Amino acid sequence: EAACLLGVVLGQDLEIGDDGVFRIIRNVAKDRVISVVDPEARHGHKTSAHSFDGYKGHIAIDPDSEIITATVVTPGNAGDASVAKELITDLCKDTALTSSTGTDSNSGPGPAADSSSNPDGDDPATVYGDAAYGTGEIQSFLGEQNISSKCKTQPPVAKNGFFTKDSFSIDLEADTVTCPGMVTVSISRLKDGSGVAKFAKSCTACSLAGCCTASVIGRKIRIGINEVALTRARTEQSSAEWRMDYRGTRPKVERKLAHLMRHRHGGRRSRVRGRLRIDADFSLLCAATNLARLAKLGISSISHSQWAMSP
């Protein structure tokens, strides 16, 4: 085991040139092992200018009571949305859809997800999350699970101030894309279900080409496999009601993270090594925070495993 670790630590910084000579790599290896005493730790980034080494702690909360309902610890380089499904299992089809939960990461700018439900069970649960959760995969998953999504999806961007993707009219039923110059082309589908619309020679004679593309082969619009979910999410979040609800609910999980970080017990710095041990210690910290929250709400246990709120 020690020999394998030594091989990884040495090998991740070396590459073989065309002449067969080993040289030091002039970049950071993917999934780089950063510690020989804790091989599961990784480099992470909170922002492009703020990095850290170690792990990320992710939480799920109920937005009404602000009780933490789930925790997960990942290496520092793991994407914040990579554990989203794990944190909201209580909202999925095979469990009670009327439960509540929420998620966020204490080491990165990652998504925060909260969920709320109708006491009558008529409405589906709702998940709130920032842009890290608003990926096509997550949006599609929430739709499949009949979970209402309040996860923020970033609008399309284009370099050099060119027309963005939302300037084009995409008709998924007809499988066509119409550009701002009113030229319509068909979407060429790939094996994985994604596609691309190529305007090619149409851009040569177009008066808007200078605002659209600098490519000699014309503008291309890529259609992802989750395009329907992303389009629906962007349309919903354009309403003032959606934004007001989002801004009033999602920050609650950020406040809960602040509560976790103010404690010395496993706050910013883990007290043990290894993801499994840190995961258990982080869960213990969250459990203690929950007890403090229950006391704040004036809730106490009574007979028959029930709870009561103090007057």
Image: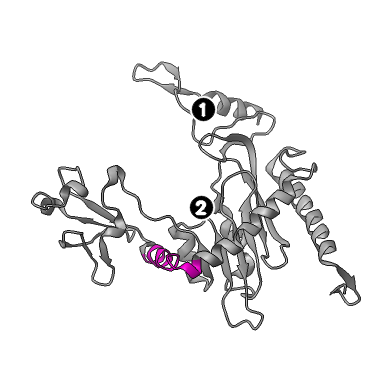
**311 or 7, nearer to the observer:** 311
Q: Where does the C terminus fall, quadrant-wise?
A: bottom right
**96 or 268, nearer to the observer:** 268
User: Pointer 2 and pointer 1: residues touching (CB < 8 Å)?
Assistant: no
Residue 10 horizontal/vertical position (percent): 55, 23
Q: Quadrant of residue 9?
A: top right
The residue positioned 50% from the left and 68% from the top of the image is: 242
- Residue 40, visible in the rendered structure: no
User: Upstream in the sequence, badge 2 or badge 1?
Assistant: 1
Graded by Cα atoms within 10 Å as few (under 14), some (14 to 19) or many (20 or more), the crowding at tag 1 reads some
The residue positioned 19% from the left and 43% from the top of the image is: 215
Which residue is labeled 1 in the image? 12
The residue positioned 61% from the left and 29% from the top of the image is: 5
Which residue is labeled 2 in the image? 132
Amino acid on which the number 2 mark rests in the picture: Ala
Question: Is 164 rendered above or below residue 30?
Answer: below
Element class at badge 2: loop
Q: Specify the segment rendered in magenta.
A: 228-242
